Amino acid sequence: MNLRSYFESFLEILYPEKNTCFICDKYDKEIKDKYICCNCNKKLERLTGNLCKKCSKPINNDTTHLCNECKKDTKFFETVKSPLKYTGLVKKSIYDFKYYDKTYYYKLFGSILLDYMVNNNYMDFDLIIPIPLHKSKLRSRGYNQSELIAKFLSVKTNIKYSNCVKRIKKTNVQNQLSKIKRRQNIKNAFLLTNLHIINNKRILLIDDIYTTGSTINECSKLLIENGAHSVYGLTIARGE
């Protein structure tokens, strides 16, 4: 059995039921590898309309196609894409994924992100890297939700996976801080463990939510300053 088959078989153990909606537990033979029924899928609010070309924040018509924050703040990533709005059922499902041991949700969100990547031609990457958790949080939670999704996408797209970015600073919870304090909180929080693997590579960072973008931007800064060609981001949802 090759590595890809082994990984897929291992992950299947986490949630083997077929054609069952992860959200409402409804059985429907049409669900297949989408992991969600039609009714629940309709409740996931999509991110549409005029969006900032850097961070995907909804904006009014603007000739620059940038939100006010991206006009004035330095962004080390090229762009961050998000298919969903961080609200309603999306918000609840991500919370359950992270804090209620629903590790199998990586399949649901991974499938949504994979469809987005394919449909929007967002595939031209050399390396997929998840935003890491600090070892203390990883030990407490037992898994990194971004890592599960990143591995899923790597398997499905054949884009190489790496966990070469480590979180070395135990930061405070970002969603409890102001934008300025988030930047201070995350500053110098990451360490790169393999310089060679990122050299001149187009990198896709995976995270669950984008709000102010402080975390992804700090990771992007580290990668760019150490030789990456360019950095892009992909998150499940875009917050306000």
Image (spheres, grey):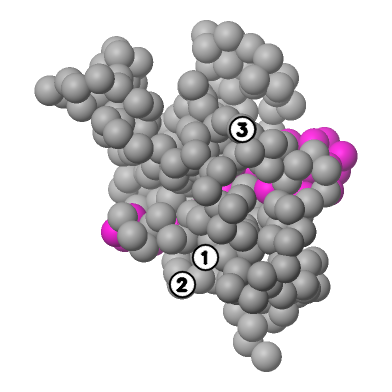
Residue at image point 56% right, 58% down: 38
Instruction: Find the distance from the CA under tag 2 to the CA under tag 1.
Output: 5 Å
Residue at image point 63% right, 12% down: 177
Residue at image point 54% right, 43% down: 44
Residue 10, percent from left and from top: 75, 74
Find residue 18 and report its image quarter: bottom right
What mark, if any, has residue 88 been given in the picture? Answer: 3
Residue 106, percent from left and from top: 65, 56
Q: Secondary structure at mark 2?
A: loop
Residue 21, percent from left and from top: 69, 61
Residue 80, percent from left and from top: 39, 38
In the image, what residue type sits under mark 3?
Answer: Gly
Q: Are the residues tagged 3 and 2 within 8 Å (C-beta)?
A: no
Vertical arrangement, residue 32 with respect to residue 61, above or below: below
In the image, what residue type sits under mark 2?
Answer: Asn
Vertical arrangement, residue 109 with respect to residue 176, above or below: below
The residue at which mark 2 appears reads as 158
In the image, what residue type sits under mark 1?
Answer: Ser
| Numbered label tally | 3
Q: Secondary structure at mark 1?
A: helix
* Residue sitting farthest toward the right: 140
